[in-house]
Image (cartoon, rainbow, N blue to C red):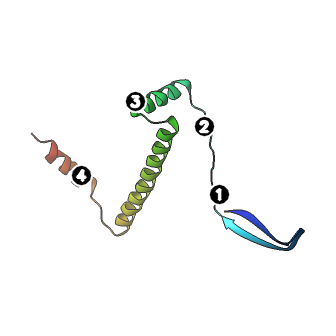
Amino acid sequence: MGTRLAVTGVGCGKRLASRLALEILEVPPTIAFMEISLAPELEAKLARIASEAGKAANQVVQELVADYLDHDEWFKREVQKGLASLDDGKFVSHEDVGRQIERILRP
């Protein structure tokens, strides 16, 4: 977390702040602006996709990043579920998987 210092002054008439209040706030860091470098062919592809979708390139990038981050969180949750199942003794043996695949692929 970042630290932000808020200073407020209370004045009386034309006198400069006769009383100062200091407040230190813990705030999460934010990214207000980010610049990325793309290879020319990737930039051209992004421009084409954005144009075809009727969107700005930065909107397409924001959507892609959001989808990637959502997928990453989902994937990590699913891995944890799988590990918890293993810890609970719930699993399918290699042989059982082979038999299931043979049943599926059998004509």
What secondary structure is marked by label 1? loop
Tell me which numbered mark, 3 or 2, is placed earlier along the sequence: 2
**Tag 3 residue:** 52
Q: Residues within 10 Å of mark 3 (few under 14, many from 20)?
A: few
Residue 95 pos. (x, y %): 24, 53
- The reply to whether callout 3 and callout 4 are in contact (CB within 8 Å) is no
Tell me which numbered mark, 1 or 2, is placed earlier along the sequence: 1
What secondary structure is marked by label 4? helix
**Tag 1 residue:** 29
| 30 and 87: which is toward the camera | 30
Q: Residues within 10 Å of mark 2 (few under 14, many from 20)?
A: few
- The reply to whether callout 1 and callout 2 are in contact (CB within 8 Å) is no
**Amino acid type, residue under disc 1 in the picture:** Pro
**Amino acid type, residue under disc 3 in the picture:** Glu
| 9 and 12: which is toward the camera | 12
Front tag of 4 and 2: 2
Image quarter in which the C terminus is found: top left
**Tag 2 residue:** 36
- Per the model, the C-alpha gap separating discs 1 and 2 is 19 Å
Front tag of 3 and 4: 3
- The reply to whether callout 3 and callout 2 are in contact (CB within 8 Å) is no
User: Going 38% across and 58% down the picture, which residue do you hit?
Assistant: 78
